[in-house]
């Protein structure tokens, strides 16, 4: 195997010399990045900064104290990953929890993998590594996917490729963002009072009051996902005659538009419009495969 031009001593020297590091980035970026990704460096705690784009926002105090005690006794087993900002400042990509616990433990320095990354790579790496290692709650994952989609104009297919998840999984998480204006359900996700399955079921209920009433039943009665799905199905069944009556009263030109949507999506849609022109289009699907088919129709 050919010897790398960057030995350990050379890497450490480069990290402390901004001009030489910039020259190395220009001359041989692939090898430098490869070496940095596999080399563990000891970095002073005071030179490490939190990442404002870090997906995880809530850290349980008791759990941090337990981790700090473990670090005092055994040290840090898994290095954190940081992005080099300049010779004496690094930003966390992954390992925020280990970093905070190390501060509590009173460490002067900690092991880290150093990477050179632009902002998109930083957020993508933070998201991917945190999802795989940090057990984010469903709301944190949804917000992270939403940031990637919005800030970097990524489709569900792009996100699926980036994070190695099925597109239907991405779509289900992004649907949770509708709870941004639904504080009780949002907080329930953050506090793990309801599961991803509960939230996915609630996301299919359009009426705000009904949705929150169902959420409260989940919390008060400790309902399973299956139980809440049955309640929602019963609620939606009870609305059918009323909805069908409204559909029958649609003017001819709106029924023709609705038929066009039916043909385009290959499923039953429901067009609603009041006298002032305000309304909504409901697109129905029966399972994840059906949802993926609808996404394909939109992405064409």
Image: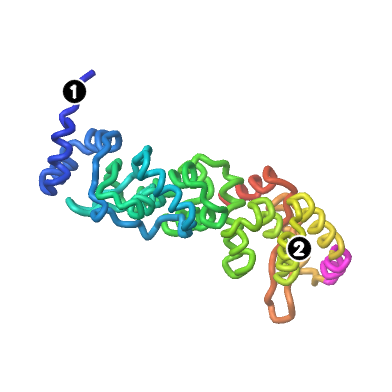
Task: Name the residue nearer the viewer: 44 or 11.
Answer: 44
Tell me where residue 157 appears, x and y as whole percent: 52, 45
Task: Name the residue nearer the viewer: 45 or 284.
Answer: 45
* Residue 126 is inside the magenta segment: no
Question: Does residue 134 appear to the left or right of 75 in the view shown?
Answer: right
Tally of numbered discs: 2
Task: Name the residue nearer the viewer: 90 or 232.
Answer: 90
Question: Does residue 78 appear to the left or right of 225 in the view shown?
Answer: left
- Position of residue 104 relative to residue 115, above or below, is below
| Residue furthest top as drawn | 1
Determine the image quadrant of residue 27.
top left
Label of residue 3 in the image: 1
Q: Which residues are magenta?
A: 240-249
Tell me where residue 94 appears, x and y as whole percent: 38, 47
- Position of residue 112 relative to residue 262, above or below, is above
* C-alpha distance separating marks 1 and 2: 64 Å
């Amino acid at each position: 195997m050919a010897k790398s031009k960057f030995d350990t001593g050379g890497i450490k020297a480069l990290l402390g010399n901004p001009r030489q590091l910039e020259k190395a980035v220009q001359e041989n970026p692939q090898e430098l990045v490869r070496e940095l990704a596999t080399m563990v460096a000891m970095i002073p705690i005071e030179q490490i900064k939190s990442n404002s784009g870090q997906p995880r926002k809530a850290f349980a105090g008791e759990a941090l104290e337990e981790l700090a005690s473990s670090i005092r006794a055994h040290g840090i087993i898994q290095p954190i990953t940081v992005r080099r900002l300049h010779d004496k400042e690094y930003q966390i990509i992954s390992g925020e929890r280990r970093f905070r616990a190390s501060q509590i433990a009173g460490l002067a320095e900690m092991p880290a993998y150093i990477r050179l990354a632009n902002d998109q790579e930083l957020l993508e790496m933070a998201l991917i590594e945190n999802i795989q290692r940090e057990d984010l709650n469903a709301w944190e994952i949804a917000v992270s996917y939403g940031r990637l989609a919005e800030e970097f104009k990524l489709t569900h297919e792009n996100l699926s490729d980036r994070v190695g998840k099925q597109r239907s999984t991405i779509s289900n998480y992004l649907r949770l963002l509708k709870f941004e204006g639904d504080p009780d359900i949002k907080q329930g996700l953050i506090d793990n009072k309801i599961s991803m399955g509960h939230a996915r079921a609630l996301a299919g209920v359009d009426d705000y009051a009904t949705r929150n009433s169902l959420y409260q039943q989940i919390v008060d009665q400790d309902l399973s996902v299956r139980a809440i799905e049955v309640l929602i199905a019963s609620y939606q069944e009870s609305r059918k005659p009323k909805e069908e009556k409204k559909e029958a009263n649609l003017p001819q030109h709106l029924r023709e538009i609705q038929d066009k949507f039916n043909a385009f999506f290959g499923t039953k849609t429901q067009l609603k419009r009041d006298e002032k022109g305000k309304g909504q289009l409901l697109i129905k699907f029966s399972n994840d495969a059906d949802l993926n088919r609808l996404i394909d129709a939109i992405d064409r």
